[in-house]
Image (tube, rainbow, N blue to C red):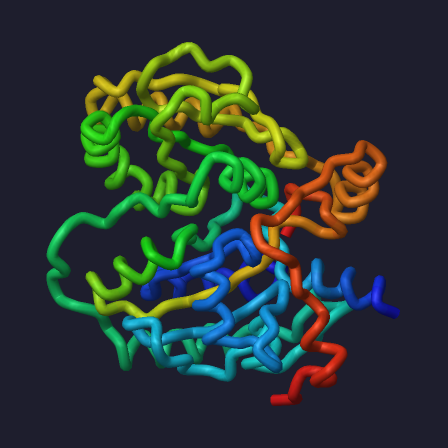
Amino acid sequence: MKRFGILLGCLTVLSQWSPAADQIAWFGTWKGGLAEAERTGKPILLISAAPQCHNVPGVW
Amino acid sequence: MDRSFLADQDVIAASRKFVCIRLATYENADENEVLKGVFAPGGVLQNTVFSLMSPDGRTSLVRAGRSPAWAFGGQVGRGIHQQPAEVIGKMAQTMEAIALAYPGKDKPVGRVPLPYLADLRLALNVAAADRLPLVAVFGNAAQRKQMEQRLEPLAWADEFLGRALYVPVTQQDEFKSITGLKTQAGYVVIQPDIFGLKGKVIQEISLLSTAAQLKQSLSTAVGRHQPSTLTYEQHRSQGAAAGQRWESKTPNTDGIGRSRFGPRPRP
């Protein structure tokens, strides 16, 4: 059950699999993104995930 | 992104009116604390966090949770990538409404900075996960400043928006997991390996390039990137079989809160 739960956790946020399509342009740090939000007055879309699944990297 | 909400064209269009921040969970203690302030059942940081927030980063404007499904409904767990169209539409509509409430400043002071990742180790992994090329801005502080001024307008132009990732690099020894490096300073376009632990140089672009030369060279280099074609399951199984492992910089506490605090609330 725990293993299944971890798998679902890995699947919760995945990167795009078709890089040719339009994608969201992400700031990669809170400091950099927050500074830009404060500079522009734009709201923030925040998401976070570990870039690994079962410790295998290269996947959200 | 999650092949549903964040890959939807209406959500992507609405995202241009937001500053979009994607953090790597468990990689930075300070960012962990920020994330815990957004969503952490029982004070325990989970693998994933999602919210839409005010420009000062202090107020969630929707119900924060592990994914957009917590705020807008839809599937969690299996089936997450086949969200109902009306649920995805709800996210896009909510973002448009928030953008109307927070239209941004008429003339923000300063330049739009590069959306940097924290360091090359993490950037390689994230680029592999995104299946995108990685552009290292390599040089000392003065050189990087010069390069950033040329690269920033391109990074936010339609041709390149969301089609490459960026990382600053100061020292040559930071490239120890990258093959093919020759330059002492410049733009270094990198092909991450499938698992994001290594990489190879696709192209080096002179830091003295004019804006037009940089645009041409960057377009060529990005076009040479070869994204992985593995399915999610193939990626995970091949990575495990090959012993490809990622060690986060801070302890992974995913799941601890969930078992204690039950399933997600239904919208």
Q: Is residue B10 visible?
A: no
Rendered view: B144 above or below A4 = above
For residue B227, above or below residue A4: above
Residue at 37%, 68% in the rendered image: A44
* Res. B101 in view: yes
Name the residue nearer the viewer: B260 or B159: B260
Please state the horizontal and vertical placement of residue B206, each as a whole percent of the image: 29, 16
Give coordinates of residue B233: x percent, y percent.
80, 48
Give the quadrant of the N terminus of chain B: bottom right
Q: Quadrant of residue A5?
A: bottom right
- Residue beneath the point at 34% across and 72% down: B57
- Compared across the picture, whether B67 is left or right of B258 comes to left
Q: Is residue B229 left or right of residue A27?
A: right
- Residue at the limit of the structure toward the right, as seen here: A1
Q: Quadrant of the C terminus of chain B?
A: bottom right
Outermost residue, top direction?
A: B182
Q: Is residue B93 above or below residue B144?
A: below
Q: Residue shown at 47%/57% (left/top)?
A: B22
The picture places residue B263, in percent across and down from the top left corner, at 72, 83
The residue located at (65%, 59%) in the rendering is B252
Give the image location of residue A28, x and y in percent: 43, 51
Q: Nearer the viewer, residue B151 or B10?
A: B151
Q: Against B152, is B265 above or below?
A: below
- How many marks on residues? 0
